[in-house]
Image (cartoon, rainbow, N blue to C red):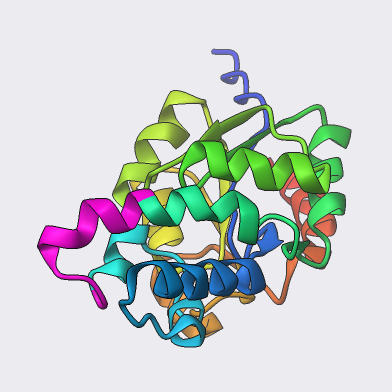
């Protein structure tokens, strides 16, 4: 019986603290939200725990009856305050280039609103073949499966949950709020210090496939 043809390489990446360091811009947006709404948000505390959806963070500061308005205001303010200060994470460009050098496709799957995620990618010149937003943990697995992802790269334990649920290897980068040991415990098959180690890692992975 012939061996099954391997799936085409399609690598999914998380956005915040995986591909981009959005902490300065997100902090600035939270400070602008405080100024507009009069509700104090500790911006530095908020950016120290990036990963979960916006509503999860806003629930620490806003009562339920103000949540929808807070989300709308934050997303309106975001392009003004958050895009320009955001920088690519070390190795981000090279990681995307490595996927394409192996004939693969790049998929960004993030908890951030898709429109805002694309603003970051466009501003930094980071090209993705597909962007799926407003997804977290197991929800990300739906997009990973839909787009035929073969790997998922992220900085959060919830990203490793997404990879495991989708049935693909989870590659973790210890650049976000989750320590390396927690990422391994969440199911990461590989933990890198940052994306600078990704090109060599994906090359080894492909050679062993």
Q: In the rendered image of this protein, does residue 11 appear above or below residue 73?
A: above
Instruction: State the extent of the magenta-drawn residues as a range.
Output: 60-72
How many discs mark residues in the rendered view? 0
- x 60%, y 25%: residue: 7
In this rendering, would 35 be left or right of 119?
left
Image location of residue 55, percent across then percent down: 29, 59
Which residue is more in the foreground, 81 or 172? Answer: 81
Which residue is more in the foreground, 144 or 70? Answer: 70
- x 61%, y 72%: residue: 23
- x 68%, y 40%: residue: 209
Image location of residue 148, percent across then percent down: 52, 27
- Can the viewer see residue 166 in this picture? no
Which residue is more in the foreground, 106 or 31? Answer: 31
Residue 144 among magenta residues: no
Q: Residue furthest top?
A: 1
- x 23%, y 51%: residue: 68
């Amino acid at each position: 019986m012939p061996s099954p043809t391997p799936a085409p390489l399609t690598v999914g990446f998380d956005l915040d603290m995986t591909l981009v360091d959005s902490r300065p811009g997100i902090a600035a947006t939270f400070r602008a939200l405080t100024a507009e709404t009069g509700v104090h948000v500790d911006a530095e505390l908020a950016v120290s725990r990036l990963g979960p959806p916006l509503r999860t963070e806003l629930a620490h500061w806003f009562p339920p009856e103000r949540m929808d308005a807070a989300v709308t205001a934050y997303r309106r303010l975001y392009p003004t305050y958050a895009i320009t200060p955001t920088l690519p994470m070390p190795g981000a460009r090279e990681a995307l280039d490595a996927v394409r050098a192996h004939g693969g496709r790049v998929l960004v799957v993030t908890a951030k609103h898709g429109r805002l995620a694309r603003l970051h990618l466009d501003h930094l010149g980071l090209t993705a073949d597909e962007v799926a937003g407003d997804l977290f943990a197991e929800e990300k697995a739906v997009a990973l499966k839909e787009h035929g992802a073969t790997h998922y790269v992220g900085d959060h334990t919830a990203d490793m949950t997404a990879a495991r649920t989708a049935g693909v290897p989870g590659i973790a980068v210890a650049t976000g709020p989750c320590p390396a040991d927690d990422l391994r415990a969440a199911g990461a098959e590989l933990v890198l210090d940052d994306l600078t180690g990704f090109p060599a890692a994906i090359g080894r992975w492909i050679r062993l496939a």
